[in-house]
């Protein structure tokens, strides 16, 4: 079973999704709340939530307006666009290859040399930057048998980056050994610490070179992974958590005797953990070499015991695209993911979140705050898996 291009079309644009009561609802691209000018002095008024941003039970993703300069739209309410109000991350790591190569923006593929290997990636940059604008960065990790181009083209990611105002870095898999065999597995999650450190160094080098060439908002550097990529994102949270403001794990996790366990993160980043319930497994629920239900729950246990803010979503439809229904006013079904990233900058207090008083209304009813909080999903006619 593979997570292929249709998944990312749903993940980043919003495919027909099952609703909690009626079965499905159409999503539209790019309405998850657009973000604009970042950096000191760029933000507007902030709401009265627990740490600023969203009022309890509300959303901090509004505030969108036209820019008189004719560049990107402005979302001054997103916390990533507010002046920092707390701890900041360390500066980007030095590039291990000496001087960074010139990167080319998508749709061309570009590369850095890391640990002696040529590591390819796509770098998606908003095409209409505003004067002085700095961009959050999201690292996106694809699924088994997928490719970085599936994320780029299947997800219409240039359009999303233009609307949401972030840089997307989509690393290309090199292939990895899993259980001692070469496979199409994209990123290492089971091997020695030395091998994992090599993979983490790829992240270092990509962050270093992307931020050297493009104006970067270091308060908002996030990671998102899908399936095998989510397993790697779960490891990146630990190995390079000092740089990460938030993490979104879609059918991933740790431990369960199959991947490396949770050992802690140097930064208590907020996390959104989403999966498909007990049937979410590979190759399938009857032969669960990878039980994403168990893996996700072990990740949640580690996050909770370590004091991270946790949002839990369980759609109970197995190993399929994340079912996120379209929101009010034509918002994309993926608005919760955009909002979660853009409203959880690094400088939030440990364990803090603007969502502490309640999730925004764009979240589906099968999401909750904290481990074991997701209400039972009532989804009719689950779509097929991959």
Image (tube, helix red, strand yellow):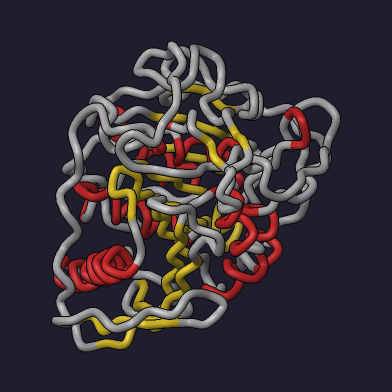
Q: Residue furthest front?
A: 68
Give me the residue at 50% from left, 44% from top.
Answer: 36
* Whole-percent x, y for residue 281 in the image: 55, 53
Q: Residue furthest right?
A: 22
255 over 246 or under it: above or below: below
Query: Would residue 190 be visible to someone looking at this image?
Result: no
308 over 220 or under it: above or below: above
Of residues 23 and 125, the one nearer the viewer is 125
User: Is 6 on the left-hand or right-hand side of 336?
Assistant: right
* Whole-percent x, y for residue 105 in the image: 48, 75
Of residues 185 and 127, the one nearer the viewer is 127
183 over 274 or under it: above or below: below
* Whole-percent x, y for residue 324 in the image: 67, 39
Give me the residue at 25% from left, 27% from top.
Answer: 85
The quarter of the image holding the N terminus is: bottom right
Give me the residue at 46% from left, 16% from top.
Answer: 47
Q: How many marks?
A: 0
The quarter of the image holding the C terminus is: bottom right
Of residues 340 and 298, the one nearer the viewer is 340
Q: Quadrant of residue 219?
A: top left
* Whole-percent x, y for residue 93 in the image: 16, 62
Of residues 305 and 245, the one nearer the viewer is 245
Query: Would residue 380 be visible to someone looking at this image?
Result: yes
Give me the residue at 16% from left, 66% from top.
Answer: 193
User: Is 316 on the left-hand or right-hand side of 240?
Assistant: right
């Amino acid at each position: 079973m593979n997570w292929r291009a249709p998944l990312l079309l749903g993940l980043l644009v919003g495919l027909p999704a099952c609703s909690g009561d009626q079965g499905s609802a159409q999503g539209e691209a790019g309405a998850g709340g657009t973000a604009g000018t970042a950096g000191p002095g760029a933000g507007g008024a902030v709401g009265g939530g627990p740490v600023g941003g969203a009022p309890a039970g509300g959303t901090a993703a509004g505030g969108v307006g036209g820019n008189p300069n004719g560049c990107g739209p402005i979302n001054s309410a997103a916390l990533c666009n507010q002046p920092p109000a707390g701890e900041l991350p360390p500066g980007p790591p030095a590039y291990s290859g000496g001087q960074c190569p010139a990167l080319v923006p998508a749709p061309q593929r570009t590369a850095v040399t890391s640990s002696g290997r040529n590591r390819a990636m796509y770098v998606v940059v908003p095409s209409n930057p505003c004067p002085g604008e700095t961009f959050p960065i999201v690292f996106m990790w694809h699924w088994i048998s997928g490719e970085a181009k599936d994320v780029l083209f299947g997800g219409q990611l240039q359009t999303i980056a233009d609307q949401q105002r972030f840089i997307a870095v989509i690393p290309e898999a090199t292939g990895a050994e899993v259980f001692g065999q070469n496979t199409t597995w994209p990123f290492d999650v089971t091997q020695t610490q030395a091998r994992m450190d090599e993979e983490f160094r790829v992240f270092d080098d990509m962050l270093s070179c992307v931020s050297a060439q493009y104006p970067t908002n270091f308060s908002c550097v996030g990671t998102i992974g899908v399936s095998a990529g989510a397993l790697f994102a779960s490891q990146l949270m630990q190995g390079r958590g000092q740089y990460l403001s938030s993490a979104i794990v879609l059918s991933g996790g740790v431990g369960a005797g199959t991947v490396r366990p949770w050992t802690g993160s140097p930064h208590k980043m907020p996390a959104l953990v989403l999966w498909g319930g007990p049937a979410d497994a590979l190759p399938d629920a009857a032969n669960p070499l990878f039980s994403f239900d168990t893996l996700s729950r072990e990740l949640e246990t580690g996050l909770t015991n370590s004091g991270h803010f946790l949002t839990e979503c369980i759609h109970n439809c197995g190993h399929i695209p994340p079912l996120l229904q379209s929101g009010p006013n034509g918002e994309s079904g993926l608005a919760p993911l955009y909002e979660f990233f853009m409203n959880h900058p690094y400088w939030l207090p440990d364990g803090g979140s603007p969502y502490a008083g309640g999730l925004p209304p764009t979240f589906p009813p099968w999401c909750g705050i904290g481990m074991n909080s997701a209400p039972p999903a009532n989804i009719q006619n689950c779509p097929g898996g991959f």
